[in-house]
Image (tube, grey):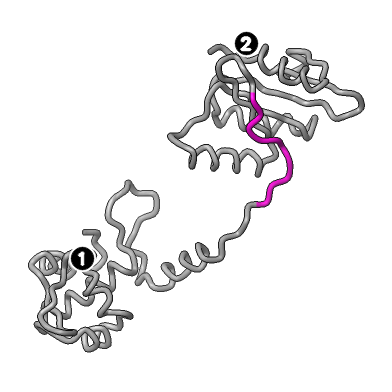
């Protein structure tokens, strides 16, 4: 779909709401006016890009009612769509999607304050506080991450390698790992095996995970 093909459906949408619409006014793709209300500015593009976002923000100097009109949104599902709309609202832009020759408003411009999530904030800070050192380089490709949880399991496994089967409470106290019994029972990495009630040993997989720690205490397994 060409940008010019978006114009007709968007114009019809706004005219249906009582606006008088004209195209290519100054630097704007479309400007609609209704009475004494602030003008509605719409920028038409074939895709939602950073350049379009910057263009929309620039138009906010002329009106608070600025929309971006595209034939489709990037992303692969409803979650991505929700996040895109939240971003647009946060920077004060509206969104119009043209599909099948019909324009539909997906969000209106206006002040947006995202709702805080104390649980996510607390979880973030707990991970930061519990992680020992700085074992991860930010921005690297995906893969196993040396989280505080993984660091704790490595310390538990290292203790068992050195001392043999031991009670979970003893191991946890020795290496200062909270909820050691839960970690060994859950056995998320397959490093532990239960010998008897409350007593655990390390598996071969656990021994292999601990081995590099001798020379590289912060390596990522």
Residue density around tag 1, few if under 14, some if 14–19, many if 20 or more, within 10 Å: few
Rendered location of residue 169, percent (x, y)? 24, 87
Rendered location of residue 77, percent (x, y)? 45, 36
Question: Secondary structure beneath disc 2?
Answer: helix
> In the image, is 23 to the left or to the right of 144?
right
Q: Which residues are magenta?
A: 104-113
Name the residue located 26 percent from the left edge and 83 percent from the top edge.
172
Give the residue pinned by disc 2.
4
Give the residue pinned by disc 1.
216
Res 64 quadrant in image:
top right
Res 155 quadrant in image:
bottom left
Name the residue located 34 percent from the left edge and 59 percent from the top edge.
136
Question: Secondary structure beneath disc 1?
Answer: loop
Viewer-proximal residue among 54 and 100: 100
Cα–Cα gap, marks 1 and 2: 59 Å
Viewer-proximal residue among 2 and 132: 2
Viewer-proximal residue among 8 and 40: 8
For marks 1 and 2, the one nearer the N-term is: 2
Please tell me whether residue 105 belongs to the stretch shown in magenta.
yes
Rendered location of residue 115, percent (x, y)? 62, 56
Q: Do labels 1 and 2 touch, CB within 8 Å?
A: no
> In the image, is 152 to the left or to the right of 104?
left
Magenta stretch prevailing secondary structure:
loop
């Amino acid at each position: 779909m060409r940008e010019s093909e978006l114009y007709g459906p968007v114009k019809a949408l706004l005219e249906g709401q009582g606006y008088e619409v004209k195209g290519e006014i100054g630097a704007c793709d479309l400007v609609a006016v209704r009475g004494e209300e602030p003008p509605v500015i719409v920028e038409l593009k074939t895709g939602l890009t950073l350049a379009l976002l910057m263009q929309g923000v620039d138009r906010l100097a002329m009106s608070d009612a600025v929309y971006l009109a595209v034939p489709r949104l990037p992303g692969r599902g409803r979650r991505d769509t929700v996040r895109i709309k939240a971003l647009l609202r946060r920077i004060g832009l509206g969104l119009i999607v043209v599909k099948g020759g019909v324009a539909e408003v997906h969000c209106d411009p206006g002040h947006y304050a995202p709702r805080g999530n104390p649980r996510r904030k607390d979880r973030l800070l707990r991970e930061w506080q519990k992680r020992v050192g700085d074992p991860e380089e930010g921005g690297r490709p995906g893969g196993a991450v040396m989280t505080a949880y993984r660091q704790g399991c490595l310390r538990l496994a290292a203790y068992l390698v050195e001392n043999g089967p031991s009670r979970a409470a003893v191991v946890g106290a020795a290496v200062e790992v909270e909820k050691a019994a839960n970690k060994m029972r859950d056995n998320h990495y397959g490093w532990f095996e239960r010998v008897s009630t409350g007593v655990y040993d390390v598996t071969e997989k656990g021994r292999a995970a601990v081995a590099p720690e001798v020379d590289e205490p912060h390596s990522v397994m």
